[in-house]
Amino acid sequence: MADIVLTGNTSGAITVAAPAVAGTNTLTLPATTGTILDTNSSLSAPNLSGDIPIASFPTGTILQVVTVQPDTGLVTFTSTSFAEVDSDLRVAITPKASDSTLIVTCNYLFGGNNGTQMVAMKLYDITNSTNVNTSALGSKQQCNSSVRDMSYDVNDGVQMQLQAQTTSGSTVARTYGMYAKLEAAATRYFFANFSDTGALGYAKPSITVMEVAA
């Protein structure tokens, strides 16, 4: 193994050692004045730039969070087959890794209109036309939540949260939304109480995707 020894002005020396391997390799030095780092050096945050390789992050690291909170107003819903509640309530994400975990969460106010019909709700991958981590069980609807709210009157309201996780599978962009389905013909309300009085509320919904390193 050939070495190059750089002798200091007053004392000491730095040895540049080439490994004893076949082939020719090139070490390119920067055309600027500065300090070369080694395994014992530290680098301050202001000097960092560019993207850190995803493989460098430990399992459980949050790689990115994308969230949308649209101003939808009151949405009236009557569909007896799964349909998107509001197209403004969508979130798009381009995963940074193909093996990461995507956690999709949707929060919103739901009004049951004092009705007896069940309502199934689910998170949906619109790009790939697939549910987000649902399973079949007999004749039941595949969904992320199901509710019957008949507490008092037309202004019945409950705060809902849907959450499901899936594997990214690729780094291709995809869009998620929230879908619902009525058991039978009826009317339900999303994101606000039906009547317009100071005693009632309107809460903008939100939908979020968090990507977590595998």
Image (cartoon, rainbow, N blue to C red):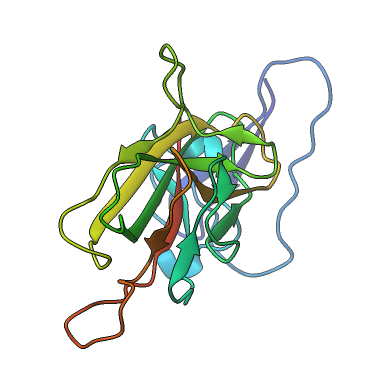
Residue 180: % across, % down: 48, 46
User: In this view of the protein, can residue 30 be seen by the observer?
Assistant: yes
Residue at point 63% right, 70% down? 33
Front residue of 205 and 165: 205
Residue 66: percent from the left, percent from the top?
Answer: 49, 58
Q: Is residue 153 above or below residue 164?
A: below
- Left or right position of 172 against 119: right
Image quadrant containing the N terminus? top right
Quadrant placement of the C terminus: top left
Q: Nearer the viewer, residue 120 or 56?
A: 120
Residue 3, image x, y percentages: 65, 31
Residue drawn at 43 percent across, 37 percent down: 183
Q: Nearer the viewer, residue 3 or 100?
A: 100
User: Is 1 situated above or below 8?
Assistant: above
Q: Is residue 44 visible?
A: no
Outermost residue toward the top in this view: 138
